[in-house]
Amino acid sequence: MTWRLVVLCGVCVLPPFLLGADSSSRWGKTVTFHRTPRRMGQVRARPIRDTSSSSGISNPSHGPAFTSCRIPLTPAEHKVLDDNTHETGFNGDDGSYVILTWVGDGTGVILVLSTIGVPLDSFLEGGSSRLYRSTDYGKSFHDISHRINHTLIKEEFGVSVGPGSSVILTADTPILNNPGGIIFTSTDAGATFKFIQLPFHLAQPITYHFLNPDYLVALSIDGGLWLSLDFGAKWTKVHDGVHSFSWGAGINLFFSCSRVDTVKADERGDLLLKRTKDLGKTFATIHEDIYSFGYIGAFLFFSVMEDSRSPRVMYFSSDQGDTFSQALLPSASTEQFYSILDGDEDMLFMHVDNPGDTYFGTMYTSDDRGILFSKSLERHLFDGQRKSDFTNITSLRGVYLTNKLDVDGRIRSVISFNRGGTWRQLKKPQNMDCGDHSKSCNLHIHGEHSRKNEMVPMIALSEPTAIGLVIAHGTVGDSLSSSQHPDVFVSSDGGYNWRGTLRGPHHYSILDSGGLIVAVESHHGGQVKTIKFSTDEGQCWKSYNFTEQPFFFAGLASEPGTKAMNVSVWGFRPEEDGQPMWVAVTIDFQSLITRECNRWDYEEWLAHSTEGASERNGCVLGVKETYRRLKKKSVCRNGRNFVVSKEQSPCLCTREDFLCDYGYYRQLNTSECVRQPSAANKTLEMCLNGEEDELLTTGYRKVPSDRCEGGITPHLADQTVIRPCGVKTSPGPPVKSTSSVTHFDTPRERLVLILVCAGAAVIVLVAIVSAFFAVRRVVYRTRAPAYRFSNLRMQDDNNGITADPESAASSNGTACQLDSDDELIE
């Protein structure tokens, strides 16, 4: 799975959430189900920011009503599901949580870890874990606790899955009187485990290399950076004083570290950013005096305060740190933060917090170098809990959804279909009407801000294999409602049009590449026994009672990748002795939907199409995309071999395919880009500490990732030269001069020196002027130069996994470097 949200001025890469603590990786998915539901009204990490409305959300409202289509199960369907529903009770497990992990792709292997007894700490010993293994997608489990000697495994990062079928379990080992921690490794999806005594205690999860599962990197509690090249059998310390790390492309490994005997270097921004290209044999310093850094796509980025009186600025590198440039963004003081919301080969989404406790900031989009940034959305919501509602709708290219905090203190949802180029409010659902009492009637989506405050159990869900499908909790009206009973809405075209589909909050999951949706109603403290399912993208639903004995719901679990048709409902049931028992009910819908889809079950669908037959209908970012996808009325299964099929055709370029370049802005009610009068001065201010890089521009640049061809290319009559911050090379080791110093003592010697220097200066000046006019003639005879493209790779459609391993996303996905801004990003 991918990680998206990265907060800078202190880096904290936050994993996506599913049903509680979710630690997902690119090779599997781990979910923790807690027995005790979290209480309402949790304490905030920061005080609530002061806005014109106390919560930024309007008064509670159940919203306008809609009718949900229900179809009863036939007796035959009920019997088929009864015969293919499997219930497992984990008797004797008195732990408050279970950790569930899928291992491998399509293996059907699930590991379930349950805690028994009192967890270990630094002084006490006792407690153990039970480990269960399923090889049939959760229909049956076998107790394999003896393979790990019933050792107590950590809850926080006890289970980690890697490429292929590799698994690492980390024991909850006391620090006192123990030289190091204990891990259990498996290369066969948990069929066997190997006991390994570590020479250090882990501070965070062990991180796999994205290409070679034998390459592991770990951070110890004393700041040591450790490497293993044989899947954990042997470990070597490669550096001390390390605060955070991240794999880069190839075997590049980046890390921030303190200088020797430097106290609280991270709080003062006194860290060094280093890189090793040979697995710890040699090191190079990329930059000094950094606060924190991150890596996404193949962009390396870090925040720096270049002197004690200046705010922090951002630097980016697209060549693994060999060179780097300052981003043309507003600087951030200690009261603010930067947040990279998303990124790939073409661009980055960056949030810059507003000063003070404002609850919002400005979202920017970058060029392909991560240097030139354009304003995308003002008043972007980013609350005091490090939570942004920014969501990449992965089921359709170019679609992003987020919430903004308007000047009236209300939260409203906006959506972009062209990667942040323009934003608009969501349409009113097709089967709803707000009535006359509402000032406006739009759909507003609950995001991470609402999930954190337990208004909804899940955020918006989309999958790359389920083209156009989006499922989300929302309310309809003038703004987002704080109702504890939001409804579920579905879009089949990537967010253009919506329908109300289920009343009240639900947990939901996408199966069979979108051919099946399942949902369980969310009850605070209530018990469940019914699952709902739809084969027509949520237009109609059937209900099935999967157990005769209801239990307290903990979560839905389905294999990552949406290819499977098995789903497990997890929870716990009180026993006669008062002790709870964990329960898992797995339902195999493949037994109900038996027919394989054929070519008549699919239809051609033009993405981003609207009413009308204009030549540019469906053109987004310069391309039309026609997909082959399942008809809603077809009740069949796509199967595990289903592959998304699409055809692309380029569009003619229009003015919509271009942005105003750096130093230009689009005047109100016009499409023309106009030079900003103060742009030159602002540019020079940002380049005081860097070289100037001349960029010839006509005031326009193509939207990142836009692939239009021909048509028009807007440009101003006069080309101008702007000077954004230039490229710096990473400092190498200092070179000591061994030459002697020459002194010029006599007047004759000084006169000769002056004449020689003057003559040399004249020669150099003439050469520079001649070269300038020669280059200028060449440049003006050709078109304005396109910005160079970085060596990043496009992310694959499969769950956002990077297609080219050379540009894999940071594998240090759950590591937080805490610095002086930790309260801002906590």
Image: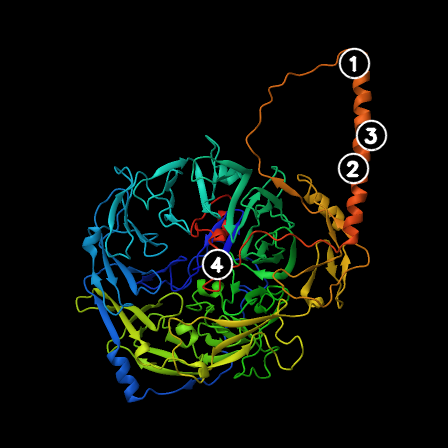
Identity, as a three-letter code, of the amino acid under mark 1: Glu
Question: Residue at label 1?
Answer: 749
Crowding at dot 2, Cα within 10 Å, few <14 / some 14-19 / many 20+, comes out as few
Residue farthest along the left direction in this orientation: 577
Cα distance, mark 2 to mark 4?
45 Å
The numbered disc on residue 803 is 4
* Among the two numbered marks 3 and 4 on one chain, the one whose residue lies closer to the N terminus: 3
Contact, CB < 8 Å: mark 1 with mark 4? no
In the foreground, 14 or 101: 101
Give the quarter of the image for residue 719.
Answer: bottom right
Q: Cα distance, mark 3 to mark 2? A: 10 Å
Residue of label 2: 768
The amino acid pointed to by label 2 is Ile
Q: Quadrant of residue 534?
A: bottom left
- The answer to the question of whether label 3 and label 4 lie on touching residues, with beta carbons closer than 8 A, is no
In this orientation, does residue 66 appear? Answer: yes
Q: What's the CA distance linking mark 3 and mark 4?
A: 54 Å
Q: CA distance from mark 1 to mark 3?
A: 20 Å
Mark 2 / mark 4, whichever is N-terminal: 2
Check disc 3 and report its element: helix, strand or loop.
Answer: helix
- The amino acid type of the residue labelled 4 equals Ala
- Residue displayed at 34% across by 52% down: 157
- Number of the label disc, if any, that sits on residue 762: 3
